[in-house]
């Protein structure tokens, strides 16, 4: 039996491809903090102290192994002049694209992080969390990749056309976005974030073929990640990555967020100790799981990827939906306690009920 | 090539390959050759629809990327528009159809389905982005037979319950097809919200609309 560890020790041991006391649980809750404080989602995200308190309450309630400083994706496009749409029961969404004509890209300059009110709330949140937990719990910051950010800046269809049809303007946009992402990620690390989750859904093979990824998202990641002064986790936000896992590893990232669309055991084998995996519980189905189903899903994920460390249990998208009830999240927590303790001796007798044999 | 000849079917992989590799000129060449022996509508049904169906299925299986699906649909829409313009009498019997995105500005899925349906010979209204009340009002006002709705996130998918209930109550014959990430990750969700079908890809949407078109003629 391994000696009990705090969340930071547990996570660092797993990332070092060793077995800690148990599988780290990265329960990536955001809007649930508003429920805890009895606030609307818009009220909740309006003040940094709300999110600090919300995250700490969620940490106590679910006994996860990280604090998540992520607000919502469009807080980054707000810095570029974009807007955000709030709803009462879901994550704030990005408003209309801010780049409506391709010519706007020609003179595009990245906004300064210190002048963006939303980004500064996030930084204040990270400082507040760091003051409360020190180095005992990892604080995860988030930066949308320069390659994926234009989905919000231009709209997905216009951006795909730009990539294929206007390579010079694509390069111009990437220059501005790389500068922004590097400054934003480093500001979060300076504020106290332990690591940066580099959300890069467009690089998934769900969205672009590998050949295009190698010419675009991969090159951008190789330019950006070395300039971020701390560890990074690349998250494909539910997209597939098995066929590009070697390429993603070559960007220098420490962790890859993987999808429930792919088999965790295959992913673990492909990672081969070079990178850790984060995932891959289905956050959409999670809404209607019974506690018994939650336990079964947790057990299956640990069975497929837990051995030898290098695995952080999480959802597959990088954010637990608002509609997922407490009893499911608590059942996940309990299942990790029951089945995630190293050594995973129960594995010898375990057969996946989904396997045909 | 002769209508009904296997030679026409043999062009489908060539056409598909041109689309997947974003070779618009090559795709146009194959389609033009087919039109030397087929009517415009036959060319759509024998060449364009099978190729786009295969591309959509390949994406659902993880073998192709969304960018290829999108560009293929857009190219086909443009090519078909050249010889089978909107409103052409040779276009298919049209159920009154519309497509919309509920609640957010993530419009790619809608754009793909819209392009593929038009490239397959169907015409439909593009409502853009609407909220629940706007969508119900437009669908009833236009007396739709088919409504296709794309969503990005789970809360929007769950709002489809309200949309479907109100539409079915006011216009029982209207069929609703839903699509988007929440439905892909939970294959029970479309039934839960009261939709008539869920499209895993644009090809599914074409198949459903085609089937319902046949039922209504």
Image (cartoon, coloured by chain):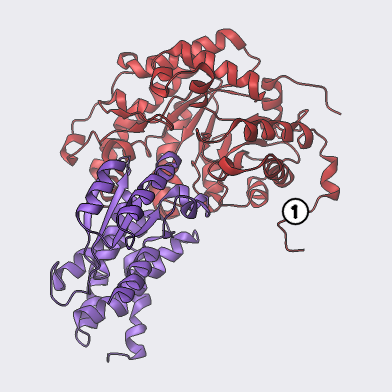
Chain colours: A red, B purple
* Residue A275: quarter of image: top right
Horizontally, is B99 left or right of B62 in the view? left
Residue at the top extreme? Answer: A131
Residue A308's place in the image compared with B38, above or below, is: above
x then y, percent, for residue A30? 50, 26
Q: Chain of mark 1?
A: A
Give me the residue at 32% from left, 69% from top. B18
Residue A157's place in the image compared with B64, above or below, is: above
x then y, percent, for residue A292? 71, 42
Foreground of the two, B102 or B121:
B102
x then y, percent, for residue A64? 65, 25
Give me the residue at 42% from left, 21% from top. A40
Location of the N terminus of chain A (image quadrant):
top right
Give me the residue at 68% from left, 22% from top. A7
Location of the C terminus of chain A (image quadrant):
bottom right
Q: Residues within 10 Å of mark 1 (few under 14, many from 20)?
A: few
Whether residue B15 is visible to the viewer of this picture, yes or no, is: no
Foreground of the two, B82 or A196:
B82
The residue where tag 1 is placed is A352
Foreground of the two, A208 or B125:
B125
């Amino acid at each position: 039996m391994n000696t009990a560890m705090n969340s930071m020790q547990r996570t660092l041991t797993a990332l070092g491809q060793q077995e800690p006391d148990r599988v780290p649980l990265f329960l990536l809750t955001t809007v649930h903090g508003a429920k805890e404080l009895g606030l609307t989602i818009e009220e909740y995200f309006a003040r940094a102290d709300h999110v600090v308190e919300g995250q700490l309450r969620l940490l106590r309630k679910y006994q996860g192994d990280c604090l998540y400083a992520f607000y919502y994706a469009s807080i980054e496009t707000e810095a570029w002049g974009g807007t955000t749409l709030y709803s009462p029961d879901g994550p704030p969404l990005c408003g209309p694209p801010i780049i409506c004509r391709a010519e706007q890209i020609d003179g595009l300059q990245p906004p300064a992080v210190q002048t963006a009110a939303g980004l500064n709330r996030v930084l204040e949140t990270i400082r507040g969390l760091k003051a409360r937990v020190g180095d005992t719990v990892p604080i995860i910051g988030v930066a949308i990749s320069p390659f994926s950010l234009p989905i919000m800046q231009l709209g997905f269809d216009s951006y795909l056309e730009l990539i294929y049809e206007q390579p010079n303007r694509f390069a111009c946009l990437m220059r501005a976005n790389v500068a922004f992402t590097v400054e934003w990620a480093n500001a979060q690390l300076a504020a106290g974030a332990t690591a940066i989750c580099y959300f890069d859904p467009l690089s998934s093979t769900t969205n672009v073929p590998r050949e295009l990824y190698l010419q675009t998202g991969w090159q951008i990641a190789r330019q950006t990640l070395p300039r971020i002064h701390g560890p990074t986790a690349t998250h494909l936000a539910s997209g597939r990555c098995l066929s590009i896992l070697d390429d993603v590893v070559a960007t220098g990232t420490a962790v890859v967020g993987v999808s429930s669309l792919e088999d965790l055991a295959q992913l673990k084998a492909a990672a081969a100790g070079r990178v850790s995996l984060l995932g891959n519980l289905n956050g959409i189905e999670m809404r209607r799981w019974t506690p018994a189903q939650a336990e079964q899903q947790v057990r299956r994920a640990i069975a497929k990827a837990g051995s030898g460390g290098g695995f952080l249990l999480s959802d597959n998208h990088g954010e637990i939906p608002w509609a997922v009830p407490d009893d499911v999240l608590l059942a996940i927590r309990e299942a990790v306690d029951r089945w995630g303790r190293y050594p995973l001796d129960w594995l010898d007798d375990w057969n996946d009920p989904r396997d045909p044999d | 090539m002769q209508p009904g000849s296997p030679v026409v079917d043999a062009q489908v992989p060539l056409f598909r390959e041109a689309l997947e590799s974003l070779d618009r000129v090559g795709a146009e060449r194959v389609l033009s050759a087919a039109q030397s022996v087929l009517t415009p509508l036959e060319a759509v049904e024998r060449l364009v629809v099978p190729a786009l169906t295969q591309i959509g299925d390949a994406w659902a299986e993880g073998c192709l990327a969304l960018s290829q699906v999108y560009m293929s649909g857009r190219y086909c829409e443009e090519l078909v528009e050249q010889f089978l313009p909107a409103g052409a009498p040779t276009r298919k019997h049209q159920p009154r159809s519309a497509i919309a995105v509920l609640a957010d500005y993530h419009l790619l899925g809608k754009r793909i389905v819209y392009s593929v349906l038009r490239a397959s010979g169907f015409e439909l209204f593009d409502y853009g982005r609407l909220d629940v009340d706007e969508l119900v009002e437009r669908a009833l006002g236009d007396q739709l037979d088919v409504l296709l709705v794309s969503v990005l996130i789970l809360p929007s998918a769950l709002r489809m319950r309200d949309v479907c209930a109100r539409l079915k109550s006011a216009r029982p014959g209207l069929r609703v097809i839903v699509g988007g990430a929440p439905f892909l990750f939970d294959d029970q969700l479309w039934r839960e919200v009261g939709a008539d079908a869920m499209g895993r890809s644009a090809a599914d949407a074409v198949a459903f609309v085609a089937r319902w078109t046949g039922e209504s003629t």
